[in-house]
Amino acid sequence: MLITMKLQVLMFYQDDPKKCTAAKIVKFGLAQNIKKIGNKGLVLDPFSEKTLLPKDKSLINSIIGIDCSWNLADQAFSQKFSGIKRKLPPLLAGNPVNYSKLNKLTTVEALSASLFILNFKDQGLELLNKFKWGHTFYELNQNLFDEYSKIKDEDQIELILKDYGLL
């Protein structure tokens, strides 16, 4: 039996509903739309001081993506959320709007990246398969995902980024 992580999204409805990746994965039953975040939920927060590491898997019972516009992200993330806040290590966007921009990920890219880092690879690929460009995100970052899924502490991220010429 395949072990999966519970995925949730807190939606602010700030973007074009036709392009909203969070709405699409909720529609397909791959994530749950929530109004409140629990204490053991991992909140993907690009402004967090701490980076997501594989060892964080033992602290959480779900992964929460905050779905908001990048133009309003500072406002959305300035709100007080409960849960365990982590940012993702640097990754390249595969979506058509922010293609190959560092850290300008859609909600589905952020959720799938966290799944890869926490070693839920099959579930991460299942999410990306719902999008025409999903394979592009995976292909751009596949080597980084492999590296990030093995690290023990944040200091190792800088070494990885140097190896890949991203620093």
Image: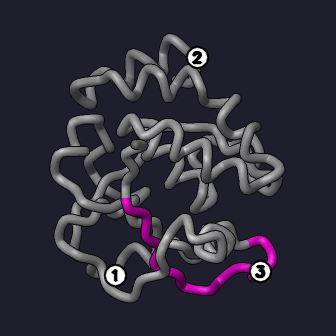
Which image quadrant is residue 3 in? Answer: top left
Label at residue 79: 1
Categorize mark 1 by other alpha carbons within 10 Å: few (<14), some (14-19), many (20+): few
Which residue has dot 2 on it?
A: 165
Distance CA(mark 1)–CA(mark 2):
34 Å
Q: Position of residue 75 (x, y in %)?
A: 46, 80
Q: Which mark's residue is nearer the viewer, 2 or 3?
A: 3
Q: Nearer the viewer, residue 19 or 128?
A: 128
Ranked by sequence position, the earlier of labels 1 and 2 is 1
Q: Nearer the viewer, residue 135 or 167?
A: 135
Amino acid type assigned to the residue bearing label 2 in the image:
Gly
Label at residue 138: none
Q: Is residue 103 above or below residue 80?
A: above
Residue beneath the point at 22% across and 25% down: 152
Residue at disc 2, secondary structure? loop
Q: Position of residue 144 (x, y in %)?
A: 52, 25
Which residue has dot 3 on it?
A: 16
Ranked by sequence position, the earlier of labels 2 and 3 is 3
Q: Position of residue 62 (x, y in %)?
A: 32, 62
Residue at disc 3, secondary structure? loop
Does residue 52 appear to the left or right of 70 in the view shown? left
